[in-house]
């Protein structure tokens, strides 16, 4: 048997390209949201020094306007994710069709049959069905891997301690995500709109916190614009109505993480479905990928697996099929 990275190399390259393009698309959606708020900034700049009751009405109007714009953004995010999942899945299928066509099978017929795999994979992911069995909680989240950081032997004690802490937090985050998606109620749509509700809540906190600080709605709208724009550094001086600090976070982080995770799972699940009935492929090798692979994925790097393992959120790892040395000849003979 031999690991052949060329069979699904087009799919891997396409996935990488889609993830990069997708990040820019989603970033652009939130920049556009910030531009919508900029229009509110200009509007409220002309309506300063109003009565307290008028300011409250303005604040409520601002919340409604920004929430409605956020809803539109999330609709576009969902469409973007679905479009890219299907594109990645189809490329994996096309790579598999190319491999099978070596035996002389009709390419159009193969593509028609394989398209059903892509449809099933996408539906199982977006509905959450793929996450609802006990074996679907990724083995990569095993608590045995928690804390197995790979600090350099020459690293200081402080560096090793920091690496261990990072590994533990990464693994715990993955376990939490796996358990959330394992819930019967999880779906792509519910995840997107749940995240949007969090955005609504944060918007309300910023507005009401600004009112509590005696800020004008003009000043509050400027705070919101800066908080929403992913290209700007978040303000540190925001507090909610109870006087607690609102810590700066990237408003597009949840959408970006979900988009990357769905792209990765579309790639992985289509790969698993494409190879599972091929007698010339015996499992696959897990290959850690990305600029900063986590300690858990590094521990799995180069290892051979037969079972399906879903990557953790933001994962970028790849799989290389384990092929029979004479797979081309055997495939031809099998289909004669």
Image (cartoon, rainbow, N blue to C red):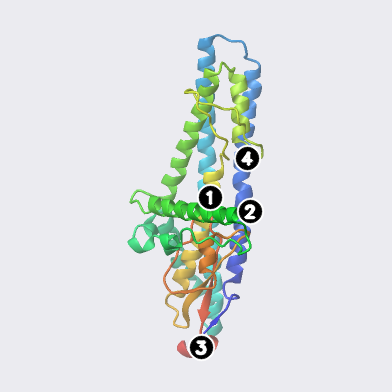
What mark, if any, has residue 21 been given in the picture? 2
Residue drawn at the location 61% of the way across and 10% of the way down: 49
The residue lying furthest to the top in this view is: 51
| Residue with the mark numbered 3 | 332
- Residue at image mark 4: 230
Q: CA distance from mark 4 to mark 3?
A: 53 Å
The local crowd at label 4, few if under 14, some if 14 to 19, many if 20 or more residues have their Cα within 10 Å, is many
* Numbered disc 4: secondary structure: loop
Quick check: can you spot residue 53? Answer: yes
Judge depth for marks 2 and 3 and give the one in front: 2
Label 3 residue SS:
helix
Report if residue 64 is visible in the image: no
Q: CA distance from mark 4 to mark 2?
A: 16 Å
- Tell which circle, 4 or 2, labels the residue nearer the N-terminal end: 2
Residue 56 placement (x, y as % from top left): 51, 16
Counting residues from the start of the chain, the first of labels 4 and 1 encountered is 4
């Amino acid at each position: 048997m031999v690991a052949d990275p060329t069979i699904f190399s087009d799919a891997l390259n396409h996935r990488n390209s889609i993830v990069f393009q997708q990040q820019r698309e989603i970033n652009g959606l939130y920049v556009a949201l910030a531009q919508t708020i900029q229009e509110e900034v200009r509007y409220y700049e002309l309506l300063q020094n109003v009565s307290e009751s008028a300011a409250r009405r303005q604040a409520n109007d601002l919340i409604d306007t920004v929430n409605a714009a956020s809803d539109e953004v999330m609709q576009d995010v969902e469409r973007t994710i679905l479009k890219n999942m299907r594109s990645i899945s189809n490329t994996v299928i096309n790579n598999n069709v190319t491999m099978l066509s070596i035996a002389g099978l009709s390419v159009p017929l193969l593509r028609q049959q394989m398209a059903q795999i892509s449809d099933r994979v996408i539906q199982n992911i977006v509905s959450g069905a793929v996450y609802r069995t006990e074996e679907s909680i990724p083995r990569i989240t095993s608590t045995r891997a928690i804390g197995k950081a790979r600090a350099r032997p020459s690293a200081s004690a402080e560096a090793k301690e920091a690496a261990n802490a990072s590994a533990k937090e990464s693994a715990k985050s993955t376990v939490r995500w796996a358990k959330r998606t394992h819930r019967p109620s999880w779906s792509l749509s519910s995840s997107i709109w749940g995240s949007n509700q969090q955005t609504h809540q944060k918007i309300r906190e910023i507005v009401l916190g600004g009112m509590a600080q005696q800020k004008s709605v003009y000043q509050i709208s400027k705070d919101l614009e800066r908080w929403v724009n992913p290209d700007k550094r978040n303000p540190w001086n925001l507090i909610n109505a109870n006087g607690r600090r609102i810590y700066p976070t990237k408003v597009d982080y949840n959408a970006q993480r979900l988009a990357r995770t769905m792209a990765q799972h579309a790639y992985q699940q289509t790969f698993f479905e494409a190879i599972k009935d091929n007698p010339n492929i015996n499992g696959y090798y897990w290959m850690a990928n990305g600029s900063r692979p986590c300690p858990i994925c590094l521990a799995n790097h180069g290892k051979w697996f037969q079972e399906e393992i879903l990557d953790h959120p933001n994962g970028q790892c790849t799989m290389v099929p384990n092929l029979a040395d004479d797979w081309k000849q055997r495939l031809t003979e099998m289909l004669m």
